[in-house]
Amino acid sequence: MSPRGYDRPLYILPFDHRGSFETKMFGWHEPLSGEQTAQIAAAKQVIYDGFEVAIAGGVPKENAAILVDEQFGAAILRDAKAQGYHTACPVEKSGQEEFDFEYGADFVAHIEAFQPTFCKVLVRYNPEGDRSLNRLQADRLHRLSSYLQTTARSLFMFELLVPPEKAQLDKLNGDKKRYDLEVRPGLMVQTIRALQDAKVEPDIWKIEGLDRPEDCEKVVTAARRDGREEVGCIVLGRGEDERQVRKWLTVAASVEGFIGFAVGRTDFWDPLVAWRSGKATREAAVAEIARHYREFADIFQGASRSVTK
């Protein structure tokens, strides 16, 4: 069964971070108290407010989306759905090397409760890595893919991370930049094909930034092979600085099949830190998040238009 696909422009503000948010933003560890949970939810509300300000300021509503978790963002997900925004919700456990469902066998009930536009997974998969782990992850992902295709309520968004194996880095003398440029693009294509062969059928592939258009083209070719012409790709920010994110957005937007982006930490992290430390007001943090998000949308739109002219 082929995916339905999604090939319309899509500009996502992701703030589904859980473990990293707890430990790096707040310095807390599980289990959280009710007050701690409420404080994290309040911080995520600041991000959501920035998203809405950006839409009011010109980001097309039909292309905008949020990605937020149920644990800290249930109220946001419900409001966004009521407002007619595109929503995405993660189903994976946070911060694990091995993909598994956040709510175990109950994952279906949680998807049904929120019915997001997109059901998102984050998966670390290196095709030259542990074979048994890769098979285990593929089996779990096939289960989710089959459910989503059968119910047709939410589309399947797949965030693919391809971390280097030690042997791969050793060949490059530990140079991670060379790995990203020379090795990772080919591994991503291998992974996409392997997961498709395992009957894992995302409608959207969420891809780590690539520096060369030809590598983006190869990823799209893999994502759309064998009748998957409607499948889209979006580029993620990976928490990099604004200069690098702008480059990745511009490169991706120049390639047909890359329909948008998902940039989170580069957008909201510094404004939230400034607000929490008392160096900025809540209103200033909201405005800065909105400014970043709108700027990224403008960059992608502008680069896309220059290609189609």
Image (cartoon, rainbow, N blue to C red):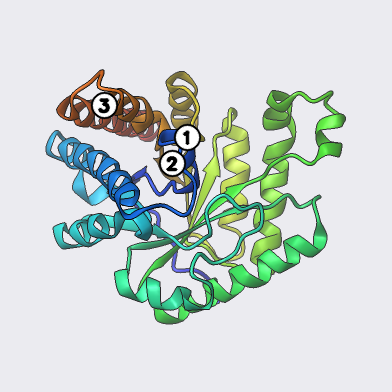
Instruction: Give the structural element (helix, strand or loop) at label 2.
Output: helix
- In terms of sequence position, does the residue under pointer 2 or pointer 3 come before the other? 2
Question: Which residue position is annotated with label 1?
Answer: 24
Q: Quadrant of residue 280?
A: top left
**In the shown orientation, is residue 68 left or right of residue 138?**
left
Instruction: Give the structural element (helix, strand or loop) at label 3.
Output: helix
Quarter the N terminus occupies = bottom right
Question: Which residue position is annotated with label 2?
Answer: 21
Q: Give the CA distance from mark 2 to mark 3.
A: 15 Å
Residue density around tag 3, few if under 14, some if 14–19, many if 20 or more, within 10 Å = some
Q: Is residue 199 above or below residue 224?
A: below
Look at the numbered discs 1 and 2 and tell me whether their residues touch, using CB distance below 8 Å.
yes
Q: Give the CA distance from mark 3 to mark 1.
A: 15 Å
- Residue 6: horizontal and vertical position, in percent? 40, 58
Question: Which residue position is annotated with label 3?
Answer: 275
Q: Is residue 175 above or below residue 26?
A: above
**Dot label at residue 125:** none
| Amino acid carrying mark 1 in the image | Lys
- Residue 269: horizontal and vertical position, in percent? 38, 30
